[in-house]
Image (cartoon, rainbow, N blue to C red):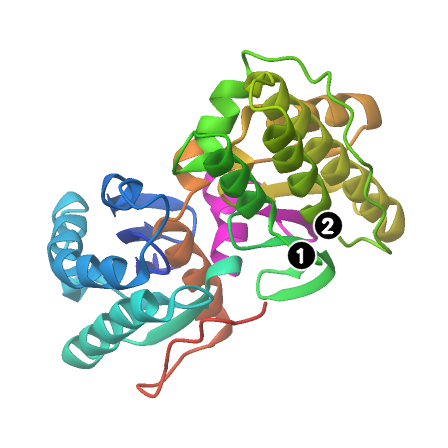
Amino acid sequence: MKDIIILGIESSCDETAVAIVKNGREILSNVINTQISIHELYGGVVPEIASRNHVQNISPVMKQALKEANMNMNDIDAIACTYGPGLVGALLVGVSYAKALSYASNKPLIGINHIQGHIAANYITYKELKPPFLTLLISGGNTQLVLVKDYTEFEILGKTKDDAVGEAFDKIARVIGLGYPGGPKMDKLAKEGNPNIELPKVNVEGLNFSFSGLKTAIINLHHKNPDINKADLAASFEKDVAEILMENARRAVKQTGVKKIALAGGVSANSYIRQAFKKLEEKENIEIYYPELKLCTDNAAMIASAGYYNYLKGNFSDLTLNAVPNLKL
């Protein structure tokens, strides 16, 4: 069987990324230009600045990806790009570039849901992983529990009713003075603290999530007592978040009978959450998967991997493809 080579483009937020992936599982190149240092100055991502930087970076990043893979456009079978969800201006840069590339090179175009990309990151890390499995998608923009029925077929079992878990991490980090990006800084600080602060338990129906109450409780504690131990605050928040995630994961396993759970999204890089799920795996005989760290955050390899499975299904896009900032899975 002929190898299928997919070029992936990702520009949904503040990373300009292009990757080339073989057969959905093998990275030939994965180039990421991150804007973290730019947006750090503003305490978060500024959409207009992100879009302008994507425009400047996308062509050099694409050329670098081809160079590192030792390929040219003749070697590429299809072009996959993120078309949502994300920041509309940022998405438009990647979509427009992918459409122009598709037209100029006469290669098929595949629009990819960013969330599907995060799920596919696990296929690169675990060559043996196949559906069906559960995915716990935890990122700055999304918190969802998904049953992956097939490579392109998904059922959402639960989602956040308010803040995404990564959004809560970022907001707390900003309030307690850690700055942006909040997730990694909270993770680092929590290692110095003890999870000894009692926080309110949040009850949500079904397999849904809520993090707003926890976030507000932490912020209120800090406002009332600015001298409170911030490391203990961070550790206590991480502990409660991990417990909420694991409880719903347990329920999903019971409900579906599927005993494989793949973590995905930027928050899946959190060391406490990884350790907690490792203990869950040992205790309850559930298989746990999580992408290697460089594939947890936004990258184009995951988009190319998802593109491969859509390529096999014949799920192609035409040149009317547009950015959909609120795209659902």
Q: Which amino acid type is marked by label 1? A: Asp
| Residue 181, image quadrant | top left
Q: Is residue 169 above or below residue 230?
A: below
Q: Looking at the image, which residue is at 88% across and 45% down? A: 254
Q: Which residue is mark 1?
A: 162
Q: Is residue 209 above or below residue 260?
A: below
Q: Which residue is mark 2?
A: 210
Among the two numbered marks 2 and 1 on one chain, the one whose residue lies closer to the N terminus = 1
Residue 127 part of the magenta segment: yes
Report the quarter where the N terminus lies.
bottom left
Q: Position of residue 286 (x, y in %)?
A: 77, 33
Q: Position of residue 262 (x, y in %)?
A: 63, 42
Report the quarter where the C terminus lies.
bottom right
Check the image and name the residue furthest to the front: 224
Pointer 2 with pointer 1, Cβ within 8 A: yes
Q: Residues within 10 Å of mark 2 (few under 14, many from 20)?
A: many
Q: Position of residue 46 (x, y in %)?
A: 31, 56
Residue 12 part of the magenta segment: no
Query: Left or right of 106: which side holds 277?
Result: right
Query: Left or right of 211: which side holds 78?
Result: left
Q: Which amino acid type is marked by label 2? A: Ser
Q: Looking at the image, which residue is at 14% across and 79% down? A: 104
Q: Separation of disc 2 and disc 1 at Cα?
A: 6 Å
Q: Secondary structure at mark 1?
A: loop
Q: Position of residue 292 (x, y in %)?
A: 46, 33
Q: Residues within 10 Å of mark 1 (few under 14, many from 20)?
A: some
Q: Is residue 302 above or below residue 109?
A: above
Inspect this view and state whether residue 78 appears.
no
Q: Nearer the viewer, residue 30 or 311?
A: 30
Instruction: Tell me where the magenta segment starts and ends, as one range.
Output: 116-138
Query: Left or right of 6: which side holds 232?
Result: right
